[in-house]
Amino acid sequence: ALNLTGLDAAAVGRGAMLGRSGEWAPSRRTLVTLRTVRRLATPIKDRGAYHLHVGSGSWPARLRLLDGSELIGAGHAVITTADPIPLAIGDRFILREVGRRAVVAGGRILEPEPPARVRSVDIAALEGLLDAAPDAQASGILASRGGAAITALSAHTRGGIAPHAIVGGRWALDPDEATRLTTRAVSTVERYQTANPLRAGMPKASLASQLDIDLEVLDALLGQTDLLTESGTEVATSGFEVELDPAQRAAWDAARARLQESLTVPTLGELGLSTELVYALIRAGSLVRISGDLVVLPEQAEEVVAGLAELPAGFTVAAFRDHFGLTRKYAVPLLEWLDSEGHTVRRGDGRTPTAK
């Protein structure tokens, strides 16, 4: 007997199970192997009304036979209940038909949480797991599912762990499924690169979404392959480099020539570069963004930073403007960029170069 405090006796129904939080993974559909009782006069059928008995519990159930519309002898079925039931591989059950008021079959649980397309399941492989050790059951059920929540895998195998699984966060992947997903990931990234040749890679969140996996699972896949590389929040195929086509190269050459003329550079609108090309050049380090519509060449940015040494502590906007021969239109955004990069510290109206 157990003394359960804080729980009304009426709340504990027949068949209730006691366990730690997260120990069970209840489901409403289960794949079973079953055999009808001896001397059954007529076959059991899909359309019958049944009660599923597991342990001391009993639940109204619907039966869908997988070997035809009726059964005498051994076969397989999917049993569906209105209430979720915590089951594990190998659990034994009996099936009572309401109309006959008699037990008509019994069997064992093959898959506590089968896929919607249950006929795609390798039933023979699952039958081989019925009396296996928990870890072997976990590996086998993971191979059948491809991927599963670690907690569900443990619950459905009485604590089993798949030792060779690829683990990403709360999910486990069968190694073969990980290989299949990696192949899909490579193809998906290649298509993205073809459609977006100026981008450094495909956003990780988009890739995970297209593969229908969590970001943690994607991270685990990336850690297992050298076919894909990760840079920040983007993923690219190994060896991928952004390359400009002839028209883009010509546009960049013309824009660079204009930028080289002086620090009073044209705005982005005047340079005539596409947004994608600008972002690609910034990522490649060929341009430095100063403000929303102002970019300079890396050597121009270095020239400004080096010139700070020639200014006194507490210099003003006017002193900076005059020193570099700029108008306020260029001086203010350049100073704000210097502040943001840590090259200057602003105090009131004055700025002091840092030792950076």
Image: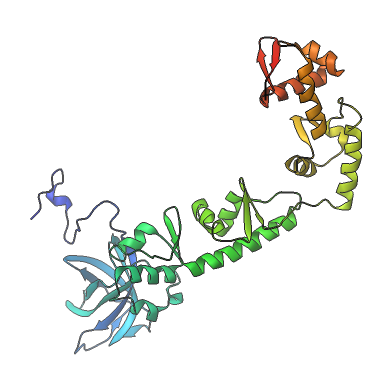
Drawn side of residue 257 relative to residue 79, left or right = right
Residue 247: x and y in percent read 89, 49
Q: Quadrant of residue 140?
A: bottom left
Residue 115, given in percent of the width and then of the height, sits at: 42, 68
Question: 294 or 342, which is in the foreground?
Answer: 342
Residue at 42% over, 73% down: 118
Task: Using residue 294 as the reference point, say whether residue 192 is left or right of it.
Answer: left
In the picture, measured across the screen, residue 19 lies left or right of residue 218, that is left
> Which residue, as the protein is rendered here, is positioned at the far left?
1
Total numbered circles: 0
Q: Residue at x 25, y 73 (%)?
A: 50
Name the image quarter holding the C terminus: top right
Q: Is residue 131 above or below residue 3?
A: below
**Rendered location of residue 325, percent (x, y):** 87, 17
In x, y percent, where is residue 314?
71, 10
Q: Nearer the viewer, residue 196 or 252?
A: 252
At 79% from the left and 44% from the top, the residue drawn is: 277
Question: Which quarter of the picture shows residue 137?
Answer: bottom left
The one nearer the camera, 65 or 141, is 141
| Corner quadrant of residue 279 | top right
- Please name the residue shown 32% across and 59% down the image: 25
Out of 6 and 206, give the one closest to the viewer.
Answer: 206
Q: Is residue 197 above or below residue 114?
A: above
- Quarter of the image with the N terminus is bottom left
> Is residue 25 positioned above or below 61 on the image?
above
Is 251 located above or below residue 332 in the figure? below
